[in-house]
Image (spheres, grey):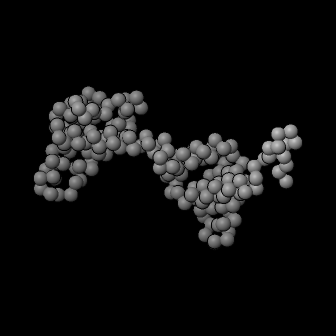
Amino acid sequence: MRGKDEDTGEFLSPSRSQQRREALDVLALADTLTELEPGRLAKLPVPEHLLPHIAEARRITSHIAHKRQLAFLAKQMRREDDEVLDAIRDALDAGGEAARQETALLHRVERWRERLLEDGDAALGELLDAHPRADRQKLRQLVRNALDERTRGKPPRAFREIFREVRELLVEADPADADGDAPDDGA
């Protein structure tokens, strides 16, 4: 029974319906975690002691046994602080901070690639000034090949390789550097 505060008349704890909704939310989160590929799961802020339970739920194929293991995983997760569960949800959320940072990085890489293809040596010079460890000859060759692929209507192999190279450069750079080296469209 929930009980009421005799002085204020307020309920002392959440209703059973609210507790059930929260438990079902955690169960849905547990199910989502078991369906993730291991690489993506490793990037999430999941506490270490929950990982064996997730692996066990993933391993079990029998429907009822899997459902029982999911319920056990959810029970273990409900013991965690709300902040931990919120951090996991945010990391999973497509609109979460980690996803926004990754999307911003991809947009910066895309702008650099387009500038390299349009402006040629001028953009390459700016990129090399920002990232001195970059391989000038390789980037110049990739830009030449990508332009040749466009004119001949060939598959965009070099175009994709430019993306990979520029992304590696931006990821290797300091976070402050990676944020500040995006070219302005008006420059």
| Residue extending furthest toward the right | 6
Residue under the point 31% across and 34% down? 182
Q: Nearer the viewer, residue 89 or 141?
A: 89
Placement of 187 over or under 91, stated as above or below: above
Placement of 81 over or under 122, stated as above or below: below
Residue under the point 60% across and 45% down? 86
Please give left or right for residue 125 compared with residue 172 in the image.
left
Q: Nearer the viewer, residue 136 or 127?
A: 127
Counting labels gives: 0
Percent of width and height locating residue 66: 65, 67
Quadrant where the N terminus is found in the figure: bottom right
Quadrant where the C terminus is found in the figure: top left
Residue under the point 68% across and 69% down? 65
Percent of width and height locating residue 55: 61, 58
- The quarter of the picture where residue 111 lies is top left
Please give left or right for residue 161 compared with residue 152 in the image.
right
Residue under the point 44% across and 42% down? 100
Residue 63 visible at all: yes
- The quarter of the picture where residue 162 lies is top left
Placement of 120 over or under 92, stated as above or below: above
Residue 42 visible at all: no
Please give left or right for residue 39 compared with residue 107 in the image.
right
Percent of width and height locating residue 125: 21, 30
Please give left or right for residue 9 compared with residue 96 in the image.
right
